[in-house]
Image: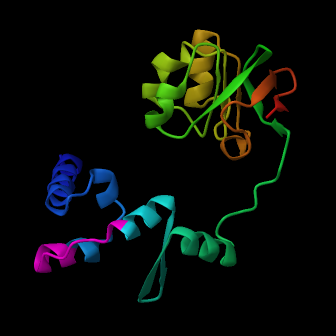
Amino acid sequence: MFIYKAFVFYAIIGFRLGLTLEEIALLTNEEIEDHLLHSKFFDKNEIAKRKEGFLLLQIGNTTSLFSGNEAHQKAKELQLVPEIPQLTSLSGSTASPGNMQGIAKVIYTNKDLHKIKKGDIVITTMTRQDFIPYLREVCALVTDEGGIGSHAAIIAREIGLPCIVGIKFGTQVIKDGDLIALDTEKGIVNILKR
């Protein structure tokens, strides 16, 4: 119930500010409070920068907010984002057998599910219940997280879908449209063509 009320609260604030719910999520509580107390509107250019990336950093009682390119630079400077190796082969655990080759579709959230076409190979951090109808259309599944008892592994076995789990960097290394191959005997995902 609380989550629903919070959703409605932020939707009303967004309406008053002329912002979407997604844009409201990019504001701090202090910025929202400023609007409510002083009818202060928020800079659309700053919101555009925050859509590119933002970093909210709190050290002691001091809070700093970085947006866009500045956020990316600060995150690198503080080494908050690990360097992702340039790999052509990733290894994990075989959750469901069956060697397969196909086109990769990287799915970060359920908003990306519309990209999936019949015969694709889904690359995701982990699966959720709302993925299941789409997984019936694909030829294989690969996840960054999980083990052989994870949601992805169980669903893959239930529907007979080749699956490798726990490859760690799949969503960061593999791109939409890459031709990839699963070797479930070795628990390896190979990028054949970018």
Q: Position of residue 48 (x, y in %)?
A: 42, 62
Q: Position of residue 94 (x, y in %)?
A: 76, 25
The image quarter in which residue 30 lies: bottom left
Going 41% across and 89% down the picture, which residue do you hit? 61
Q: Position of residue 146 (x, y in %)?
A: 64, 37
Q: Nearer the viewer, residue 110 or 47?
A: 47
Q: Is residue 55 left or right of residue 154?
A: left
Q: Position of residue 4 (x, y in %)?
A: 19, 46
Going 53% across and 32% down the picture, which residue do you hit? 127
Q: Is residue 174 left or right of residue 111?
A: right
Q: How many marks?
A: 0
Going 37% across and 63% down the picture, which residue do you hit? 26
The image quarter in which residue 44 lies: bottom left
Q: Nearer the viewer, residue 124 or 86?
A: 86
Residue 160 vs 22, above or below: the answer is above
Q: Give the colour scheme shown.
A: rainbow
Residue 139 vs 112, above or below: the answer is above
Going 69% across and 38% down the picture, which residue do you hit? 175
The image quarter in which residue 88 lies: top right
Magenta residues, as a range?
Answer: 33-44
Where, quadrant-wise, is the C terminus in this rendering? top right
For the view shown, which residue lies furthest in the bottom direction? Answer: 61
Asked whether 16 falls inside the magenta stretch, the response is: no
Q: Nearer the viewer, residue 115 or 144?
A: 115
For the view shown, which residue lies furthest in the top direction? Answer: 160
Residue 16 vs 115, above or below: the answer is below
Q: Is residue 134 left or right of residue 164?
A: left
Asked whether 38 falls inside the magenta stretch, the response is: yes
